[in-house]
Amino acid sequence: MSQPKILIVDDEYFFIETIKMRLETLGYDVIFADNGADGMEEALAQKPNLILADMIMPDMGGLELITLLRTNETTRHIPIIALSALSEPQNIREAIEAGANDYIVKPFESAELINKITSLLTERRAWGKT
């Protein structure tokens, strides 16, 4: 069985590299895009098991990306964790209402991210939606 594939959509290169290395050491297959439009293309082409999406990116932001992912038949079932430095309840609510499964405020401990990823992927396997 292949390892779960995670798509990271974020415009901060250092963040992508740091998280990518951490996830790869845990056995995840990691792909990335540095903007929302490329993130949508990668999601359609690669069909990841989970998506990490930053909320603040140039051009297409995270809310628009999540909305597009949720309205597309190919990607609507993929779990999404929204990532952002915005910590106001309104920001979190907007991301969840757009379709994010969870929300993590930057900066965060990698253990928090790993726990949320593991939980969402385990939940999907339990429901038979790999």
Image (cartoon, rainbow, N blue to C red):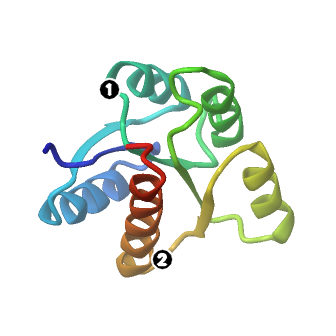
- Of the two numbered discs 1 and 2 on the same chain, state the one appearing first in sequence: 1
Residue at screen point 64% across, 38% down: 66
Quadrant assignment, res 71:
top right
Residue at screen point 36% across, 75% down: 110
Residue at screen point 39% across, 63% down: 122
Closer to us: 50 or 94: 50
Q: Is residue 93 above or below residue 31?
A: below
The residue wearing badge 2 is: 108
Residue 82, given in percent of the width and then of the height, sits at: 59, 55
Q: Within 10 Å of the Cα at label 1, are there few (<14), some (14-19), or many (20+) other Cα atoms?
A: few
Residue type at tag 2? Phe
Residue type at tag 1? Gln
Residue at screen point 59% across, 40% down: 57
Closer to us: 70 or 88: 70
Q: Secondary structure beneath disc 2?
A: loop
Q: In the drawing, what numbered circle is on residue 57?
A: none
Residue 44, given in percent of the width and then of the height, sits at: 43, 20
Count of numbered tags: 2
Left or right: 109 with respect to 32? right
Closer to us: 119 or 44: 119
Which residue is farthest right?
A: 90
Closer to us: 21 or 28: 28
Left or right: 27 with respect to 43? left
Residue 17, given in percent of the width and then of the height, sits at: 26, 54
Residue 68, given in percent of the width and then of the height, sits at: 66, 26
Tell me the quadrant of the picture where the N terminus can be found: top left
Left or right: 54 with respect to 94? left
Task: Say if mark 1 contacts mark 2, CB within 8 Å.
Answer: no
Q: Within 10 Å of the Cα at label 2, are there few (<14), some (14-19), or many (20+) other Cα atoms?
A: few
Quadrant assignment, res 98:
top right
Q: Closer to the camera: disc 1 or disc 2? A: 1
The residue wearing badge 1 is: 46
